[in-house]
Image (cartoon, rainbow, N blue to C red):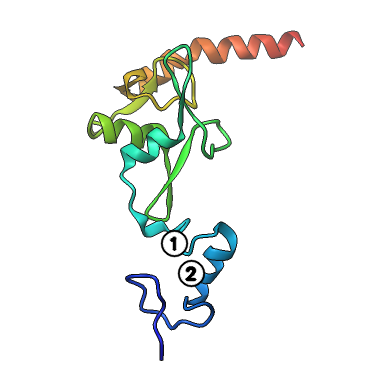
């Protein structure tokens, strides 16, 4: 029995010296290790790779976004909010019982300087004028 040529993979090799999983990655990406969840790139590097700075200082998330417009990033096979991962990677953990408020009001922004830990009540209060304005605009249409 031959083992897959990818270091650390103990699966049986079949095609081109790779196991089926690595062969599929090679066919899709041209590299048998591309797209691997186990490549363990540091969060700071991933944030920098997907964040595009704009003129206002926001780091706009160019990766996947959820239906609400917030950036999402895969961590340990789970989808996490990119702005939260950015804050934790560059600043530190979000204090217990608090959530992050986008001071810039841009949901896709992952710049930790634009994020502030606040209570849920404060976050809702700060967002209320925006929701009220959108509701008024929709009534006029």
Q: Earlier in the sequence, mark 2 or mark 1?
A: 2
Residue at 46%, 35% (x, y): give it: 50
Camera-side residue of 111 and 4:
4
Q: Is residue 125 above or below residue 44?
A: above
Local SS, label 1: loop
Q: Is residue 39 above or below residue 112?
A: below
Residue at 47%, 39% (x, y): give it: 72
Q: Is residue 84 above or below residue 2?
A: above
Measuring from the top left, give residue 130's x and y in whole percent.
Answer: 53, 12
Judge the density around disc 2: few (<14), some (14-19), many (≥20) Cα neighbours within 10 Å: many
Looking at the image, which residue sits at the far right?
141
Local SS, label 2: helix
For the N terminus, give its image quadrant.
Answer: bottom left
> In the rendered image, which quarter is residue 121 located in?
top left
Q: Which mark is residue 33?
A: 1
Measuring from the top left, give residue 110's x and y in whole percent.
Answer: 41, 27
Q: Which mark is residue 133?
A: none
Camera-side residue of 121 and 2:
2
For the C terminus, give its image quadrant.
Answer: top right
The residue to which callout 2 is attached is 22
Camera-side residue of 121 and 19:
19
Residue at 36%, 78% (x, y): give it: 10
Given contact means CB atoms under 8 Å apart, are the residues at marks 2 and 1 in contact?
A: yes
């Amino acid at each position: 029995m031959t083992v897959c040529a990818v270091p650390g993979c103990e699966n049986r090799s079949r095609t081109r010296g790779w196991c089926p999983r690595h062969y599929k990655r090679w066919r899709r990406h041209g590299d048998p290790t591309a797209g691997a969840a186990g490549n363990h790139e540091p969060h700071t590097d991933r944030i920098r790779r997907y964040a595009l700075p704009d003129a206002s200082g926001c780091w706009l998330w160019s990766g996947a976004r959820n239906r609400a417009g917030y950036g999402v990033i895969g961590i340990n096979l789970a989808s996490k909010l990119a702005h939260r991962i950015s804050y934790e990677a560059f600043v530190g953990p979000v204090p217990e019982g608090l959530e992050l408020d986008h001071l810039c009001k841009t949901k896709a922004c992952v710049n930790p300087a634009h994020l502030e830990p606040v209570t849920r009540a404060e976050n809702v209060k700060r967002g209320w004028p925006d929701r009220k304005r959108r509701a008024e605009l929709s009534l006029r249409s």
